[in-house]
Amino acid sequence: MVDAADLAAFRDHLDGASTVTITSHRSPDADAVGTSLALARYLRSTGKEVTCVLPDAPDEALDWMPGVQDIVLFDRDPGAAQDALHRADVLFALDYNGLSRLGPMADAARSATGTWLMVDHHMGPEDFPAAKVHDARCSSTAELLWGVIAGLGGKEAVDAEGASLLYAGMMTDTGSFRFGSVTGETHRVIAEMKDRGLDHTAVHEAIFGEQPMDRMKLHAFAVVERMEVYPEFQTAFVHLTAEDMERFNYRPGYTEGLVNKALGVAGVKVAVFAKQSSDRVKMSFRSTGNYSVRDLAEKHFDGGGHNNAAGGASEESIGVVMARLRGLLPEIASGIAASEGNQE
């Protein structure tokens, strides 16, 4: 449930606003894009002028989302992005807990003079918003946003298309509803969306259905040639170099799910996927049980996220990053053992 006081604060700020800009994090996933577009649809139904601004392009698997073609991308049109940020009366931070998560767009966001509001489910939110709806226990920002829209009296404005946007975020952030963050409330929200015409099968097929052959070959290569499994440490790593991704004609979203393949190896309780880009190495961390990969990512790679799913980055080379990860194996194994001891 969304706190009534938080909703009242949102309502007060929105009542006096005519222009709204919605932002989400770098390398936006389905939760980031789906919530941005769903909130934009709702706010436009109330008469607001709304612009969605993202640091860079979403995964091509999200091209089906209604309104995705209208998103302003900072890396492609920084002028239009800065204009949207600077003229907004209200700005939303969706699915991220600190402005640094915007990457190169962070400075432009910090210079915005409008009022910031946040809807997020990541641990440790910064205090830049004037008001926020935050719950780190919630399965997804999409689930939280449903509560916000409903609490503001906008449930009737969520049609089948709007529901599909929110469902996409919920489905992907919960690993198709298999993670421990899923609750009865998660399924009650989906039931309400189904009543509004949600076609959940179509959303699943749009995201996980047909895949480019290059993506399938990249995954096969990563598993066969780039996966390192350390049974004695209950840990597995996967990495891809820039050359690897060029070889398989990499497009945004092609590496989605690779970290889960490593976590799926028998006996593995912690998995890390690292990929090289032009300016950094980006990492995805996953775990099972009580071991917190969020703490690991935060301590060593300026990261954050959730106990069982986190992210981090480094400006070092992919070779150095992988060497650092291998050096952390004893620490990871010790942490796994300690977390299992806490379960007893």
Image (cartoon, helix red, strand yellow):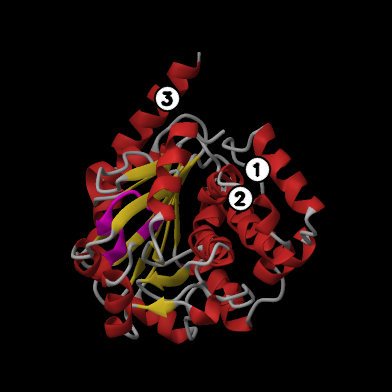
Which residue corresponds to mark 1? 178
Of residues 242 and 185, the one drawn nearer to the viewer in this rendering: 185
Mark 2 touches mark 3? (CB < 8 Å) = no
Q: Is residue 234 left or right of residue 208?
A: left
Mark 2 touches mark 1? (CB < 8 Å) = yes
Res 312 seen here: no
Residue 5 marker: none
Please, is residue 269 above or below residue 74 in the view? Answer: above
Question: Badge 2, how many Cα within 10 Å: few under 14, some, many 20+?
Answer: some
Kind of residue at disc 1: Arg
Quadrant in the picture for the N terminus? top right
Which residue corresponds to mark 3? 339
Which residue corresponds to mark 2? 175
Kind of residue at disc 3: Ser
Of residues 311 and 2, the one drawn nearer to the viewer in this rendering: 2
Q: Is residue 39 magenta?
A: no
